[in-house]
Image (spheres, rainbow, N blue to C red):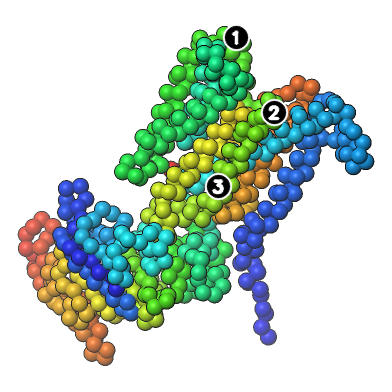
Amino acid sequence: MITARDIQVRIGKKPILHGVDFVAKPGEVTAIVGPNGSGKTTLLRALTDEIVWTGQVQINGRDIGAYKTWDLAAVRAVLPQAATLAFPFTVIEVVRMGLRSGIHGDRDIVAQRALAMVGLGGYEQRFFQELSGGEQQRAHLARVLCQVWDPVVDGVPRWMLLDEPVASLDIGHQLLIMRCLEDFAKRGGGVIAVMHDLNLTAMVADMVTIISDGRVIASGPVKEVFTDASLSAAYHCQLRANTIPDDHAAFILPQVAQSVVSLRGEAITVAG
Amino acid sequence: MTISVDIQTVRRPMDRRTRARQAHIWLALLLAAVSVISLATGPTGTSLWVAMVKIIDGEPLTAMERVVIWDIRMPRLILGIAVGAALAVSGAVMQGLFRNPLADPGLVGVGAGAGLGAILAIVLGALLPLWIAELVGNALVPVAAFMGGWLSTIILYRVSTRRGRTSVATMLLAGIALGALAGAVSGILVYVADDRQLRDLTFWGLGSLAGATWSKVLIAGPLIGVAVLASLFLGRGLNALALGEATASHLGFSVQRLKSAAIVTVAAATGAAVAVSGGIGFIGIVVPHLLRLATGPDHETLLLNAALLGATLLLAADIISRQIIAPAELPIGIVTAVLGAPVFLWILLRRRGLVEM
């Protein structure tokens, strides 16, 4: 379980998060959604202890500050929104950086299987910097998968904290990666993902937290949280949560017929 | 009918890691070979082979043979290996720390500080109280260089560390300022120096292993040895650092400890190397770069290979410097610069447009 209580973050004098509570359980994919600049990434960075924050964050029942860096890395892996790379490493060399001692099975095979899982089988000896943006993102995800290869170790769940893991991927690879995350959760691990695509979130996530202007608007199972009211309030525009009849997954469409506010501040009406 | 093309072997060359590990053995053999040549080379015509045969046959060596091989060439060989390994490994560590292939140990301020220390000792050494002069004897220049190197590293580290976090970018900029300051003070000293002192400090700046003695080996050797060995353990951390500081920390590395360890080992190794050999350039940049081209940037293998190749190249440069105008000697810094500068330019041309901080 990852729990965060009363997380407050300021950057300079500007408050970014105003006392956010957040819970994620192992065995579930927990999504954090919200508009640009709402504080999603900031919340994730507080959970990964990357920025200065106040409040309380616990991983598996233990305060995050009580972990040594090395021990913390044994229970959670982090995928940042944009990761840089110095020096011409090959793809397999980057993925191997995620490997830790104490992995069950052959380490090199783990790295290769992680690459295959993100659809990069055969890319081992390519130079990382020569890959496209989406391929680089998937290679980094393979590195993250390596770091927490076994979702549960000695009864303790391990975690993936991902900042927009599918942001620059095509629709096929978005689905592939989301299935990967689902599978990790099904096998007992925990996944926290900052998400942009609400429909993909509705399809894959078990729980969702909506953040807007540094506050939690709603939090809980996707079907309860993705309502017209909460989404419209969070994103400051009219949204309607629909349901696909076959499997009751929600899908969200912007309501173009509603009056929207133009950039100049005057109300305009779009015929629909 | 199906035509099977073995795409696997076409697309996947041998994993560079295997090649890099094999290189440990090849480079060690190469170093051994160059070491033998170094022991056998010198202007006196003393033959290593004759001496070896005598040792095997149990015959006594002549006094000349003992002095030349044991007291002159042997300490020079060991010092050459230590200095070459120190400069190359320090270069590789600095490049990993600064995440830039053009970084060199000078960036932690060792070079400027050591240079200033050496010039102070050469120009103002005569003004020291007698007891200090007697205590350090003719090791005054190396001791002053080492202390100068350390002092400037400590200042630079303090300036660039706030609330327990060291900013390598601040360190780079502060290093430029500190280097300019050290250069200005050196300039004043050069201005007041007499002709003999000017000659001394010019030669110090060009670098040489000519002054190698057993006492220098015993002072600098263990320090360099420990620092080089310690830095070999930084490989995994430096690899993670290539992904950025935040990701390195997510991977479980204490970034601040990694930085401190890198700076301390580099300052110790380079400080000691510069103190005993003067300013020898380019080894720290050229060696890691050649290795990265050949076997990739993986620091877990790169650091040991850099130590071996650095030692080999410095010994080779030393042999050239002893032979090219024998019986006189060319300062080794000239040899490494003549060989290293074109390689450095070639690196810049190859990477044109990619050299960004």
Residue A208, picture quadrant: bottom left
Q: Nearer the viewer, mark 1 or mark 3?
A: 3
In the rendered image, residue B239, in percent from the top left (x then y), is placed at 50, 54
Q: Amino acid at mark 3?
A: Ala
Query: According to the image, label 2 marks what residue?
Result: B213
**Left or right for B125, reference A35:** right
Q: Amino acid at mark 1?
A: Asp
Kindly identify the residue that appears in the image at 38 percent across and 68 percent down. Answer: A75
Which element type, helix, strand or loop, lies under badge 1?
Answer: helix
Instruction: Compare residues B1 and A115 and report the one nearer the observer.
Output: A115
Q: In this rendering, is residue A79 above or below B287? A: below
Kindly identify the residue that appears in the image at 82 percent across and 30 percent down. Answer: B66
In the rendered image, residue B138, in percent from the top left (x then y), is placed at 62, 20
Q: Which mark is residue B195?
A: 1
Q: In this rendering, is residue A204 above or below B69? A: below
Compute the Cα span from label 1 to label 3.
Answer: 42 Å
In the rendered image, residue A258, in percent from the top left (x then y), is placed at 10, 72
Residue B323, picture quadrant: top right
Q: Which mark is residue B230?
A: 3
Q: Chain of mark 3?
A: B
Q: Contact, CB < 8 Å: mark 2 with mark 1?
A: no
Instruction: Compare residues B138 and B309 and report the one nearer the observer.
Output: B138
List the single residue furthest toward the left.
A266
Compute the Cα span from label 2 to label 1.
Answer: 26 Å
**Left or right for B1, reference A183:** right
Q: Chain of mark 1?
A: B
Mark before the other along the chain sequence, 2 or 1: 1
Mark before the other along the chain sequence, 3 or 2: 2
Mark before the other along the chain sequence, 1 or 3: 1
Q: Amino acid at mark 2?
A: Thr
